[in-house]
């Protein structure tokens, strides 16, 4: 594979308080020559979260080159995306973005022919300093004009600090892995969360992160599998057992179907199999529920975490190991400490071979989750804090 390098600093579109500690980070990346071609041919783009960098990363193909756009959020982790929405878990909220239906380019072209003069009409002088606001608005208008889809923030739910990990929409609404309370929960505007399931070894709901429940695999609209670092039922007990004590749990039957996994994450159901990351080994495992067998599909140069699929294409994230991770008792220790990278990898699920990759060569050290935006090679995500969001109106009439 031929590798190409892109140099990218902090996104100028979003200046928020979450950037205070990360405003000088280097977001440089190197990518395989075929990656933008693959995304363009499939008509997709990628999303990834990096909670250490406090960014949602949008990976898209632009005129034969790869572009990585950055959106600042406080501790972004779990991701969900489909044809019409993107849902993101953050520090203490879950935010839902919906794809505009009425044609965002028509909205922008019709309303912003003279956008430079528009901010002067604002009545709220405290919104932002005028010149900065005008600059941000100008940048965002041009960015949205070049996009082929626009996702606008429509709703958010405050969860409190539940350390939300994987999230997904199902037939009963939005599901979240609540690590602090060691349960799977549904979200409601009436509560911080609605506890709906916990592992059989968790005796009570308390905010003490007993087993580090982190992953959730949906099947037919409901949670079917979950991952945890251990079977501990004591406060922060998983920390004493960190290493190869992880488990894969059948949520419906509430039983452990696989034990002894090295720090598991990101279980996913796909084509009759259950894939999950054995993160401490830098590996991807495949569990066959019918045969009750498990095999290693691939080993990657990093702490594997974050997974999604597009047909026979698997997309997986890797993170680098921290210095302290070398002291942990997990089997992939020596190999990973010798070769570990933060990146996004495209694999063939039939043989586990790497087809293409994007690796971060600067300060981005970890990826948590990955999602695919289908039928869009150039999506744009508009936050409520963005200057342009005050002038986007999409409505219907009864």
Image (spheres, helix red, strand yellow):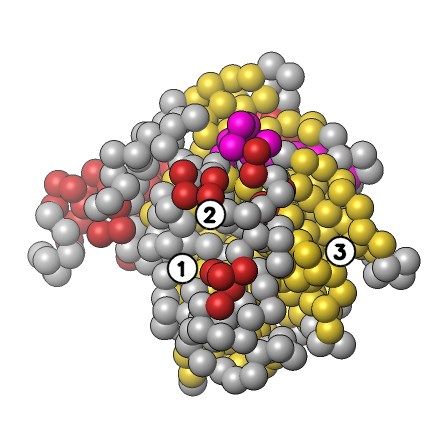
Q: Which mark is residue 274?
A: 3
Residue at x-position 57% and y-position 33%? 334
Is 23 placed left or right of 37 in the picture?
Answer: left
Image quadrant of residue 13? top left
Q: Residue 221 is drawn in which quadrant?
A: bottom right
- Which residue position holds label 2? 49
In which quadrant of the rendered image does the N terminus lie?
A: top right
Residue 348 falls inside the magenta stretch: yes
**Secondary structure of residue under mark 3:** strand
Residue drawn where x is 43% and y is 26% of the image: 361
Q: Magenta span covers which residues?
A: 335-349
Depth check, mark 1 against mark 3: the one in front is 3
Image location of residue 247, percent across then percent down = 66, 62
Question: Image point 39% across, 66% down: which residue?
Answer: 93
- Disc 2 from disc 1: Cα separation: 10 Å
User: To which residue does mark 1 refer?
Assistant: 90
Q: Secondary structure at mark 2?
A: strand
Circle nearer the N terminus (2, 1)? 2
């Amino acid at each position: 594979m031929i590798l190409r390098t892109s140099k990218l600093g902090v996104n100028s579109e979003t200046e928020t308080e979450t950037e205070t500690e990360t405003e000088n980070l280097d977001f440089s990346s190197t990518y395989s020559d075929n990656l933008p071609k693959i995304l363009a041919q499939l008509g997709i783009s990628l999303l990834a979260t990096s909670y250490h960098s406090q960014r949602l990363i949008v990976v898209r193909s632009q005129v034969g080159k790869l572009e990585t756009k950055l959106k600042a959020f406080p501790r972004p982790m779990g991701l969900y995306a489909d044809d019409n929405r993107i849902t993101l878990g953050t520090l203490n909220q879950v935010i839902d973005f919906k794809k505009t239906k009425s044609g965002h380019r028509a909205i922008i072209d019709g309303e912003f022919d003279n956008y430079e003069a528009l901010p002067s009409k604002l009545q709220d002088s405290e919104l932002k300093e005028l010149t900065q606001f005008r600059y941000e608005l100008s940048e965002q208008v041009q960015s949205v004009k070049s996009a082929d889809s626009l996702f606008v923030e429509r709703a958010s739910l405050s969860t409190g600090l539940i350390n939300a990990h994987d999230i997904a929409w199902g037939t009963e609404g939005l599901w979240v892995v609540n690590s602090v309370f060691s349960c799977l929960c549904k979200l409601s505007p009436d509560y911080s969360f609605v506890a709906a399931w916990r592992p059989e070894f968790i005796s009570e709901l308390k905010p003490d992160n007993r087993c580090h429940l982190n992953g959730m695999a949906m099947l037919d609209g409901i949670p079917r599998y979950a991952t945890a670092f251990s079977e501990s039922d004591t406060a922060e007990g998983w920390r004493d057992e960190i290493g190869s004590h992880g488990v894969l749990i059948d949520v419906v039957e509430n039983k452990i179907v696989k034990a002894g996994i090295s720090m598991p994450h990101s279980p996913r159901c796909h084509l009759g199999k259950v894939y999950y990351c054995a993160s401490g080994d830098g590996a991807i495992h495949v569990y066959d529920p019918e045969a009750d067998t498990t095999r290693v599909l691939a080993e990657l140069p990093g702490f594997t975490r974050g997974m999604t699929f597009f047909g026979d294409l698997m997309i997986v994230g890797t993170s680098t190991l921290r210095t302290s991770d070398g002291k942990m008792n997990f089997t992939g220790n020596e190999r990973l400490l010798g070769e570990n990278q933060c990146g996004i990898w495209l694999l063939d699920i039939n043989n586990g071979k790497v087809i293409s990759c994007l690796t971060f060569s600067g300060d981005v050290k970890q990826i948590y989750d990955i999602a695919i935006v289908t039928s869009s090679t150039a999506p744009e995500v508009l936050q409520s804090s963005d200057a342009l969001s005050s002038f986007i109106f999409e409505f219907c009439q009864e």
